[in-house]
Amino acid sequence: MLPHLYDRRGRTFYFGQYQGFRQALGTTQVLAVQTVAERAGQDTVTYSDGTTDTLQVPVNPAIHAVLAKYPLPNDPGGAYGARTYAAPSMVYTISDQFSIRIGQKLGPKGQFLGRFNFGNMFGPTTNPDQTLLDPSYGVQYLDCERNVLFTYTRTVSPRFLWSSSLSITRTTPTHTTPNHTQPALKFSDGLLESVHKLLDE
């Protein structure tokens, strides 16, 4: 309080709020992985007449380290038959939001409002199956949002007022991963599909 200049009673208003969200969602990831024989280069082909043939395909030595990251099948009755691997995993989502609002009366006709909003959203993992191979392969959704608002309102008459506002918003949605060298392999019906230069060398 400042004598003859500022009387805080009935003039200054403030408000603050916070809300948080935490979720740990249990899921089951089902992958198609190569069998022991396929990792050794044995490819069994089934023809239209029902006969089969086993081919021995050379395996590039550069791929062995990558194949070692993939688990062996553990659910022969699963969606991918003998190549099925199933395991539980957790998908985490974390959200924090808070806001501060301050209002100030400026004389009998004017009022100033200031507001700041802060929000962080982390998760969920967009490729939880890859985290089974290596946690650093997980791609996380991250959004950091900030908003500032200033408003001045002045009453001109009982039926007329004017208002002026300035608002600034900053948001940065990204999909982050600590591992930027993932070879991005996937197994489709037991075959190895490469989208990385490593496998072409």
Image (tube, rainbow, N blue to C red):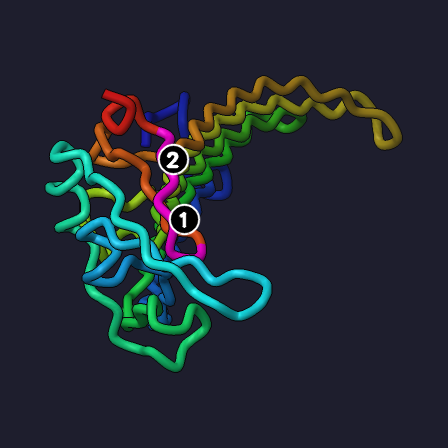
Residue 181 lies in quadrant: top left
- Chain part drawn in magenta: 189-195
Q: Is residue 46 left or right of residue 53?
A: right
Residue type (three-letter) at the residue carrying disc 2: His
Expressed as whole percent of the image width and height from the top left, the position of residue 158 reads 84, 32
How many other residues sit within 10 Å of disc 1, few (<14), some (14-19) or many (≥20)? some
- Outermost residue on the bottom side: it is 77
**Is residue 194 covered in magenta?**
yes
Secondary structure type for disc 1: loop
Residue closest to the eye, 50 or 78: 50
Q: Is residue 132 visible?
A: yes
How many other residues sit within 10 Å of disc 2, few (<14), some (14-19) or many (≥20)? some
From the image, tell me which residue sits under label 2. 175
Residue closest to the eye, 28 or 157: 28
Q: Residue at (26%, 29%) from the top-left corner? A: 199
From the image, tell me which residue sits under label 1. 126
Expressed as whole percent of the image width and height from the top left, the position of residue 78 reads 41, 77
- Sequence order check: which comes first, mark 1 or mark 2? 1
Secondary structure type for disc 2: strand
